[in-house]
Image: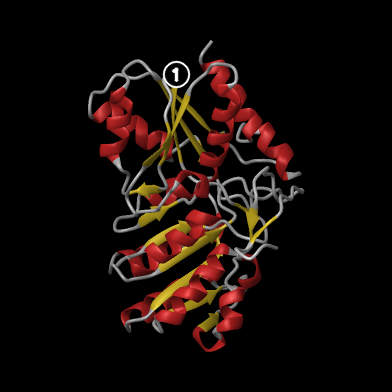
Amino acid sequence: MSSNGIQSVISDSNVVTNHPTMGEPFGKALIELAKENDKIVGLSADLAKYTDIHVFRDEFPDRFYNVGMSEQLMMCAASGLAKEGFIPFATTYSTFIARRCYDFISQAICEHHTNVKIIGGLPGLQSGYGPSHQATDDLAILGAMPNLTIIDPCDAVEMMQATKAVAEFEGPVYMRLLRGNRVPVVLDQYDYHFEIGKAKLLRDGGDVLVISCGEMTMRALDAAEDLEKEGIHVAVLHSPTIKPLDSETILAEIQKKPGRLVVTAENHTVVGGLGSLVANLLVDNKVPAKMKKIALPDQYLAAGTLGTLQDLYGVSTKAVTEQLRSFLK
């Protein structure tokens, strides 16, 4: 590993990337923040190793709480800690957050606007273990909850920047987690700086505008480079904050080049995520645009090798490239 923490490119059944990678960006960022702020604490529902908060636990054992396999209890405990002035980061899988903990997040956290940071591992299609581990609906489920800010980072660079921003933000946050030893490093090439509530244009192009979030931004950028060689010019607008959506920037980019195809790309079901939000935005503002969606289908997904599943369900770089090409025919 190099001195900046970036290690060489690795691709296996759990990681599908051609980019350099970094290990545990969330956990490492949280450690640095906790050194400066003794109010930051960590919680896990017996999944510390699988949400990268184990590195925080090892550095600050007296500021870490494992509540066991009781995610609902963890949300209530986090709310209590927040009411006492702490900044709790509550971590578990996104499936448990969205489905198992909904009522507890609503009643104990969001209704009272407590300063809890909820971090969800394995969002969307990031696991080959089938529907129990694939939180393909978390943005739709949690997006309807008042007072909750929702963030979907693209890579290790943004994961670290967003963790800092979330810690400084006052109020409940749900952030999708990019975790493990091989989180891709992409946005360092674009002089990027994360801001809550802001979408940013990473590259311009006259044929297609891709509005993307999370790791789909990485794939959209890769697809844009491939299509550039064919004379197809793809713009990529990264929208990491799902709620509140940066409506002003999105509308401005769409209207900047009338007639350009608009495509949303997300690691989430086609129902109720970024694509639905952008479509609503166009209708509400009476903006005429031809729009397509790249997203997971409205169904429970299969188990299998992650790369194979990403190809199958249309969210790999290869699949994104093929879809963008076909949309223009």
Res. 281 visible in picture: no
Image position of 4 with respect to 34: above or below: above
Tell me the residue at 49%/63% (across/down): 119
The image quadrant where one finds the C terminus is: top right
Res. 38 visible in picture: yes
Tell me the residue at 35%/54% (across/down): 195
Mark 1 element type: loop
Image position of 165 with respect to 311: above or below: below
Q: Where on the picture, by quarter, is residue 27? A: bottom right
Where does label 1 land, which residue?
207
Q: Is 301 on the left-hand or right-hand side of 155?
A: right
Tell me the residue at 65%/61% (across/down): 180
x, y percentage for residue 18?
68, 42
Tell me the residue at 32%/64% (across/down): 110
x, y percentage for residue 7?
68, 58
Looking at this view, name the residue that lies furthest to the bottom.
62
Image position of 179 with respect to 154: above or below: below
x, y percentage for residue 184?
61, 51
| Amino acid type at mark 1 | Asp
Q: Residues within 10 Å of mark 1 (few under 14, many from 20)?
A: some
**Image color mode:** secondary structure
Q: Nearer the viewer, residue 71 or 281?
A: 281
How many callouts does the rendering have? Answer: 1
Looking at this view, name the residue that lies furthest to the front.
3
